[in-house]
Image (tube, rainbow, N blue to C red):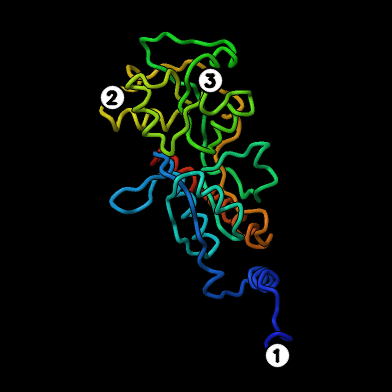
Amino acid sequence: MFWRKKCIPWHALLSALLASGAGVAHAETLKVLTEEFPPYNYTENGRITGFSTAVVQAVLQEAHLQGEFQSLPWARAYEMAQTRDSVLIYSITRNPQREKLFKWVGVIAPTQYHLFSLPERKLRFERLEQAKVYQTATVNEDAGEQFLLAKGFVKGQNLQSSVKYELNYEKLKRGRVDLWIAPELVAVYLARQAGDVPAQALARSYTIAELGSDGYYMAFGAGTPDALVERLVKGLAAIKSNGTYDALKKKWL
């Protein structure tokens, strides 16, 4: 009975601790989620690495926090970050569908999406509508798929969804799809990893300007305490002002 009378709501306690700078074990180690998305984030020798990963690690260090990193299929990571407070997700695109689902820390990496095809197909579009008569490979619940769905594309009709970008590149090469929506750096990286020359293996059929004006973010679910979010906002601003971010960009991109 005494405990029930004296119990303080967990969110209020966490907010107070973070605002005051005090630390407790569960508040100082964050669950951090991402996907296999090279060169931004990917697993190598059992360790999650990549440009975005390095940026997030630098931000956490600046904020005096530890990160428990995990790579999952994007749809699962996306759902977990939405429904669990104080779970960080990164290399996430900010779009209208997601705006109120997350608390946005800031941009951590540049991006530009294209619809890619095989050069010998000679597919070039002036309007996105022209691509609807072709089969396009997407990743389940990622920004590219959400964008095309919002534009009237339909899963199972002209969108073929999978869980990994690597699978989609293979689909394109084998002729199982006509187009592949992917960020520039990811497509180039995967082509090289497959032993191909990107300029010879891939053609840009259409550039999606709406998915390249901002960049990839790090974000928390909407229920996360503001004090925790602000701690990482300040950490990101710090690494961008002290030269750390630019040094990582030169190393990775």
Q: Is residue 39 left or right of residue 109?
A: left
On screen, 14 above or below 217?
Answer: below
Q: Which residue is mark 1?
A: 1
Q: Who's the residue at 36% across and 34% down the image?
A: 166
In which quadrant will I find the C terminus? top left
- At label 3, the amino acid type is Thr
Query: Residue 217: where, in percent of width, then height?
Result: 57, 44
| Above-or-below relation of 61 to 218 | below
Extreme-left residue of the structure: 195
Task: Determine which of the numbered discs, if any, sits on residue 207 in the image.
Answer: 3
Under tag 3, what secondary structure? Answer: strand
- The relative height of residue 106 versus residue 196 in the rendered view (above or below) is below
Q: Nearer the viewer, residue 233 or 170?
A: 170
Tell me the crowding category of disc 1: few under 14, some 14 to 19, or many 20 or more residues within 10 angstroms, Cα based: few
Of the image marks 1 and 2, the number of the one nearer the N terminus: 1
The residue at which mark 2 appears reads as: 196
* Cα gap from disc 3 to disc 2, whole angstroms: 22 Å
Mark 3 crowdedness (10 Å alpha carbons): few <14, some 14-19, many ≥20: many
Label 2: few (<14), some (14–19) or many (≥20) C-alpha neighbours in 10 Å: some
Q: Residue at x 28, y 51 (%)?
A: 45
Task: Say which residue appears at 52% left-offset and 23% top-offset.
Answer: 157
Q: Position of residue 176 (x, y in %)?
A: 37, 21
Judging depth in this view, the residue of 207 and 231 nearest the camera is 207
Q: In front: mark 1 or mark 2? A: 1
